[in-house]
Image (cartoon, rainbow, N blue to C red):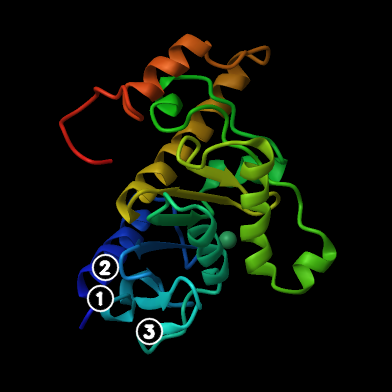
Amino acid sequence: MAYDELKNRVHRANLALVEAGLVVLTWGNASGADRQAGVMAIKPSGVAYDKLRPDDIVVLSIESGQVVEGAARPSSDTPTHLHLYREFASVGGIAHTHSTYGTSFAQALREIPCLGTTHADNFYGAIPVTRALTAEEIGRDYEMNTGKVIVEWFRDGGIDPGNVPGVLVASHAPFAWGPTAEMAVENAIVLEFSARMALNAMLLNPRLSPIAQALLDKHFLRKHGAGAYYGQERTR
Ligand SMILES: [Zn+2]
């Protein structure tokens, strides 16, 4: 089939979320895009992870949202993923989880402050919370509107989604992304660990300030952007 490699990668990304302890039951999904082909592949709706096979992964046109390969119904969160791929050109993979600590911050309507270098290696500053959806936005095209409030936060704030590759949807849970499905999963894991460590740090010191700008710059910019030098030569 035409999209076997993409489906295999997205299948592995979905299983990786479970292995990392970020997803229980069916509360989560990962997708990946093939920008040249103009498609994205995503988990089918309501399929248990232990039953999930690469051939169950559904491939859709990013532009039209039509299924181009796969017999199953795509994840109910598909319109959110499609909207993010349409609006964030640099995104090649998305991971949505209801991971415990990230979701706790989302439910508390609190951003995850950047308190240390673990967070700063992958996120250039706090991981924000969106505004709440209105009753109208919930009543009609809810999943698409979830994508819209995410994009709205980054547009209005002038924030590059490549620098802050994740967000907390208010009263819901985290979405993370990256240039590939694998990097989206990594960022979802870093988001969860950062939330957990931030909560512990704030309990230990309630008057804590965010990480020093110089240290944030050092850790993020040595791995990302034009001056990056961390790790081996590769495209991230
Ligand atoms: Zn969700």
Mark closer to the chain start, 3 or 2: 2
| Relative to 155, 21 lies left or right | left
Mark 1 surroundings within 10 Å by alpha-carbon count, few (fewer than 14), some (14 through 19), many (20 or more): some
- Image coordinates of residue 6 in percent, x first then y, are 26, 68
Q: The N terminus appears in which quarter of the rendering?
A: bottom left
Disc 3 under 8 Å from ligand 1? The reply is: no
Q: Amino acid at mark 3?
A: Val
Q: Is residue 46 above or below residue 211?
A: below
Contact, CB < 8 Å: mark 2 with mark 1? yes
Name the residue located 22 percent from the left edge and 80 percent from the top edge: 2
Name the quarter showing ligand 1.
bottom right
Residue shown at 46%/60% (left/top)?
24
Where residue 60 sits, quadrant-wise, is bottom left
Disc 2 marks a residue whose amino acid type is Leu
Q: Quadrant of residue 146?
A: bottom right
Identify which residue, 125 or 109, lies in the foreground: 125
**At which x and y percent is residue 132?**
76, 51
Pointer 1: what residue?
A: 3
